[in-house]
Amino acid sequence: MTTTSTSTPVTNPTWYGQIRDMFTTQDQQHMAAQGLDLASYEAVVNHAGDIYQQVAVGNMPPGRPWSPDWVSTFLNWMNNGYPKGVPVTSANEVEFDARLLSIAAAPAGRIRKDINTLSSTELNLLKQAFSGIVAKDPGDPNSYFVQAGYHWFPAPNTYCMHHVPGYNPWHRAYLVSFENALRSVPGCESVTLPYWDITTPFPDVLKSAPFDTYVLPQAVSPDYPEGYSTSRFDYDTIAQNLLNNGVADDVNRAMSKTDWEDFHGYWSDANYNTIIAAHDGGHNSIGPTMGAQEIAAFDPVFWFFHCNWDRLFWEWQKKMLATDLHGLLTTINQDSDPLSYQIFNEAALQSLNPFTSNPPELNTLAIIDSVARLDVDYGPSATASNVDFLPKTQRTLAANKHFTVQTSRVNVRVSGINRLKIPGSFSVHLQKDGKTIATRSLFQPVAVQTCANCVANAMSHFDFELPLAEVSGGKLSVWVEPVNKSFVGDRFPQKLMGNPVIDVHLLLQTD
């Protein structure tokens, strides 16, 4: 638990900088019994007046009243309009932060590295482990066939989570399962799974055996029989597709966000132009296998690709001091995104099947602290870039908020697309005067109506954040391109997908 100390009142305190860490675990437990969640920004704002009255007279916390400077700091936060701000990590502003110290003091045993930085010895060990699980009998739980099959096919055990709050927790558990399988190969007990930083070129090492392709040892569906070989686009096309989908821009935008739903994007009406958008655009950019949710995990690049998304999630957690339950919950908007809050607080929603009741026996709580609970950390990227936090921007705000208008950029949203009408993954192209100026993709199975997550989030939206100059002075239009063109060709009829609509908003800035 973090303790934030000040010798004088903070003039401009923020939620992420000071306020969230004024409440100890004991305080949280005490008030939770009375129906007040002190980890929730919304709850603290809504009850700020009550909290202030109790701490100002020394009634709360029981037996440990706040010092006058803390009381004044809390009042300053109220008077300033409850700004969220950004985490404070410099030593002169935070005297002690247990989360930062715990990360520094407990190095992980498993360090996942940028694949481009592996030594020849490390690379040979990885090849040995990878070839070893590929060679295992397809009935062996540590075989490549079984591990890849957890993602979707072979049916009916379709487990993967996409476009829902469990996306990152589920895939973090999945990577541990796969890495444990690699370690089951004799002599490979110390191997770790490296990552491909998708903002860099496709790694040369992944273009040759055993990472270039995989052949199904048995059928997973009528469309993917025994002997099916995974395939990709040519590597120049992959590079251009990643650029067209704005994947690097989405990654950088995500790493500049302070709120859980903004970092991930898509659900709870959050803009779809951050991590989930980058993930989906990456899948569809790489090729026929990676663009098909049913079999994506059979392409060997899947594992290095997803290791990167977990790395980015962990890096974001560390930047946000969200490496424990309290820290993570303080980033989640409980009012607009209750499900994200519930998957960490409600026992019935904490399961990450099949990895909770079976090895590695992880749930949403167990995956929060990657180092302390999973013994996993990440080495730096060969081309590491540090993205600063940016002020939060929104398309709409509550009327009681103070805000400024960003006049240089706009958000173009295409909404009302019923994804259940579109078989398989697809892309949405924004055009100006008939020329595509931006693209967003969505990753899903062909039999989309059999996907519980898809059905629960049937109506999708796509956000294009662009300079105002790029969308001004011309005619804008949108067309939807399915990955599987065997049904209706390369343009999906708008009437068949629910007649989507377009709106354009200037971005509003609060903090």
Image (cartoon, grey):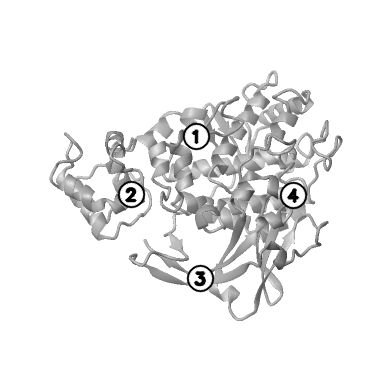
> Which residue type does callout 4 highlight?
Val
Q: Which mark is residue 446?
A: 4
Q: Is residue 504 left or right of residue 234?
A: left
Q: Which residue is mark 1?
A: 348
Q: Which residue is mark 3?
A: 505
For residue 40, above or below residue 210: below
SS type, badge 2: helix
Structural crowding at the residue carrying mark 1, measured as other residues with C-alpha within 10 Å and reported as few (<14), some (14–19) or many (≥20): few
Please provide percent x and percent y for residue 489: 81, 62
Q: Is residue 348 visible?
A: yes
Please provide percent x and percent y for residue 154: 75, 35
In this view, the residue farthest toward the top is: 186
> Which residue type does callout 3 highlight?
His
Place residue 413 in its image quadrant.
bottom right
Q: Which residue is mark 2?
A: 43
Quadrant that contains the N terminus:
top left
Structural crowding at the residue carrying mark 3, measured as other residues with C-alpha within 10 Å and reported as few (<14), some (14–19) or many (≥20): some
Q: Which residue is found at the position 38% from the left and 36% from the top? A: 99
Label 4 to label 2, Cα distance in Å?
41 Å
